[in-house]
Image: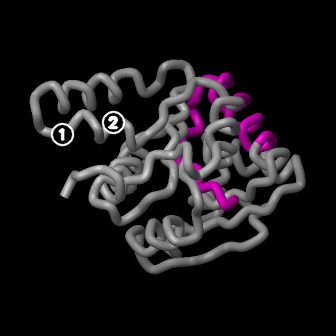
Amino acid sequence: MNVCVYGGSSTKLDPSYIEATELLGEMLVKAGHSLVYGAGGAGLMGAVARGVKRAGGYIVGVVPRFLQVDGILYDGCDEMIFTDTMRERKQIMEDRSDAFVITPGGIGTYEEFFEIFTLKQLGQLNEPIIIYNLNGYYDGMLSMMQHTVDENFMRDASLELVTVVTTQQEVIDELAKPEEDKVDIRETKFV
């Protein structure tokens, strides 16, 4: 399975985030998965790539040309796809992926998550979306999403379109679930 991992690129993170995400990368490979990601060499993007590479896995990096600057990209990608725009980057990542894992990140990671979440709600994407809530990072966002439901801006069933986990093993277990156990957006009535 080609697993898209979204995550932050900050270099000022607590080491626990880096270590856990590197281990996730290793575990993805041991479970038979390849990585599709934004090609960054720092932060959690770099961490997952280093873990995948250390375990001998295959890495597809997708990045806009304007980010091709010394020190930004991970040089261990097996395949590097350059795009003209961020939107084109996201589309290629979506097209090349069989599942999405959201690790902690900043505004770019939020934007990537909410776009695929919206696409799934609209029936344009049916792949699993897994929020890796490492160190409770996404507790506030998850609370906001529940508030959105409570205030009737989103249906409660929308929350079933994503799976929230707190460990690397839970990520791997979710990816291994048979297709019939996964939520199928076509069975819901959102649109």
Q: Where on the picture, by quarter, is residue 99?
A: bottom right
Left/right placement of residue 181 relative to residue 86 reads right
Q: Nearer the viewer, residue 81 or 176?
A: 176
Disc 1 target residue: 154
- Residue 189 position within the rendered picture, expressed as x and y whole percent measured from the top left: 23, 52
Left/right placement of residue 104 relative to residue 123 reads right
> Amino acid under label 2?
Leu
Q: Please report the residue visible at 48 percent of the width from the left and 70 percent of the height from the top.
A: 89
Disc 2 and disc 1 in contact, CB within 8 angstroms? yes
Q: Please report the bounds of the magenta region as a residue range.
A: 1-27
Q: Nearer the viewer, residue 56 or 100?
A: 100
Q: As displayed, is residue 34 above or below residue 31? A: below
User: Please, which colouring scheme is shown?
Assistant: one colour
Q: Residues within 10 Å of mark 2 (few under 14, many from 20)?
A: some
- Which quadrant holds the N terminus? bottom right
- Residue 53 position within the rendered picture, expressed as x and y whole percent measured from the top left: 83, 53
Q: Please report the residue visible at 78 percent of the width from the left and 69 percent of the height from the top.
A: 78
Left/right placement of residue 24 relative to residue 45 reads right
Disc 2 target residue: 159
Q: CA distance from mark 2 to mark 1?
A: 9 Å
Q: Secondary structure at mark 2?
A: helix
> Amino acid under label 1?
Met
Q: Please report the residue visible at 18 percent of the width from the left and 39 percent of the height from the top.
A: 154
Q: Residues within 10 Å of mark 1 (few under 14, many from 20)?
A: some
- Residue 106 position within the rendered picture, expressed as x and y whole percent measured from the top left: 42, 40
- Evaluate whether residue 181 shows in this view: yes
Q: As displayed, is residue 158 above or below residue 128? A: above
Q: Nearer the viewer, residue 157 or 44?
A: 157
